[in-house]
Amino acid sequence: QVQLVESGGGLVQPGGSLRLSCAASGSMWSINVMGWYRQAPGKERELVARISSGGRTIYKDSVKGRYTISRDNAKNTLYLQMNSLKPEDTAVYYCNAIAHSGIQYWGQGTQVTVSS
């Protein structure tokens, strides 16, 4: 079992920055890929960024150049640095971990609101 707890969400003005953190605990040895998803009201959950155990990253096109995903394996923590935030980035952001077995784990989510 793996437990994921997100933090760092909040209200920010357009153009501002936030850093999300995801503290992971449990059987982290089983985890391969970690990532961030988001879900806006009335929309499906979508992948924002993902990082493999080897450090390979992928990003949703609309966040490339603005978001950076990183992973501190020593601290079992996943980060998402978000810069130049836009109102359309408003959503609940979820931390995700995928084990080598294919089992997925989710955090409870953290709200990010971009508004003036």
Image (tube, rainbow, N blue to C red):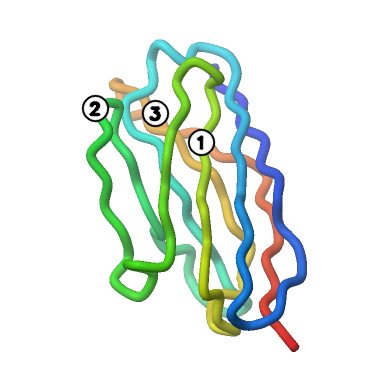
Write the residue at 38% across / 22% down.
31
Question: Which residue sits at x=52%, y=42%?
Answer: 79
Quadrant the N terminus occupies: top right
Kindly identify which residue carries mark 2. 54
Indicate the secondary structure of the residue bearing disc 2: loop
Q: Is residue 87 above or below residue 64?
A: below
Label 1 sits on residue? 78
Real-space Cα distance between discs 3 and 1? Answer: 18 Å
* Dot 1 crowding, Cα within 10 Å, few <14, some 14–19, many 20+: many
Image spot of residue 116 (x, y percent): 75, 88
- Inspect the image, locate mark 1, and give the three-letter code of the amino acid beneath it: Leu
Residue at numbered disc 3: 103
Q: From the viewer's perspective, tell me whether residue 46 is left or right of residue 106.
A: left
Q: Of discs 3 and 1, which sits in the foreground? A: 1
Choose the circle earlier in sequence order: 1 or 2: 2
Splitting the image into 4 quarters, where does residue 102 fall?
top left
Position of residue 3 relative to residue 20, above or below, is above
